[in-house]
Image (cartoon, rainbow, N blue to C red):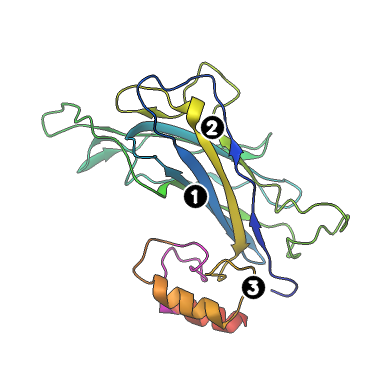
Amino acid sequence: MNGKKTLLNLVAILAIGAFLPAFSFAVVTYSAECAWTDSDLICVIYANTGGDSLISGAVALSYSSDELYDPDPADATKNEETWFFGQSTDKIVYMDPEIDTINHKIIWVVGRFELDASGVPTGVGVDGTRVEIGRVTLARKTADDPWTNPADPSQPVTFFGLSLSLGRSENVDYVNFVNTAGTPLDGSATNGGIIAAERGDANIDGVLAFADMFTIRSLIGAPYSIFADCNGDGTVAFADIFCVRNKL
């Protein structure tokens, strides 16, 4: 892709909800990592549970319909390996991501309600850092360098109009994040923002270069990086090194 290679780290916004945690001081942080090519944009939504254990969560990703097409239902998925109902060996599929084609956003509502072999709730929730909530692929309407606003280059860059929010922040009666003790966590939930870069920019410095090939090699076998996944096949492997080389 020609033009200046760029990087966006959107400012994190503190999301103050209607509820304050009654028994927990954990701070849940939700964030997104988005990588583009000339033809598409892939975003992965993550949660950092802050040391707590979650039974539910809801996050929304908004985008500009001037730059991106609304995704097909098959292009928005949630992490069903982590968020499920039933037994870990017999997971029940529920609540596909909601695609709002009027407001141009995708909403992920996830939960974990695990049962043992006898059908008794285990009380096990989801905890950890960079826990994937879900992902989406959006087709681009143009191949213009996203750092440039072709309509008015003097205006601030919006990077596809991306923004992140609580999934149901407009409804104070709806609790997005809840821990296994039943404590609402929305009041302290933090918006960790969005990092966006070209796919293949593995070290996220805004430039595709040979350094990214070395970074990809170091990330093989490590937790997934959408930026290192240059060919977009869902894994980081030696093929991604060749992908960067071809782009160079």
Residue 243 seen in the current view: no
Could you tell me residue 227's position as x and y percent? 52, 65
Looking at the image, residue 220 lies above or below residue 8:
below
Q: Is residue 80 left or right of residue 105?
A: left
Looking at the image, residue 79 lies above or below residue 110:
below
Looking at the image, residue 53 lies above or below residue 159:
above
Badge 1: few (under 14), some or many (20 or more) residues near its Cα, within 10 Å? many
Looking at the image, residue 169 lies above or below residue 247:
above
Q: Front-most of 223 and 84?
A: 223
Residue tagged by mark 3? 207
Residue at left offset 44%, top offset 27%:
185
Residue 169 seen in the current view: yes
Amino acid at pointer 3: Val
Residue tagged by mark 1? 135
Amino acid at pointer 2: Gly
Amino acid at pointer 1: Arg
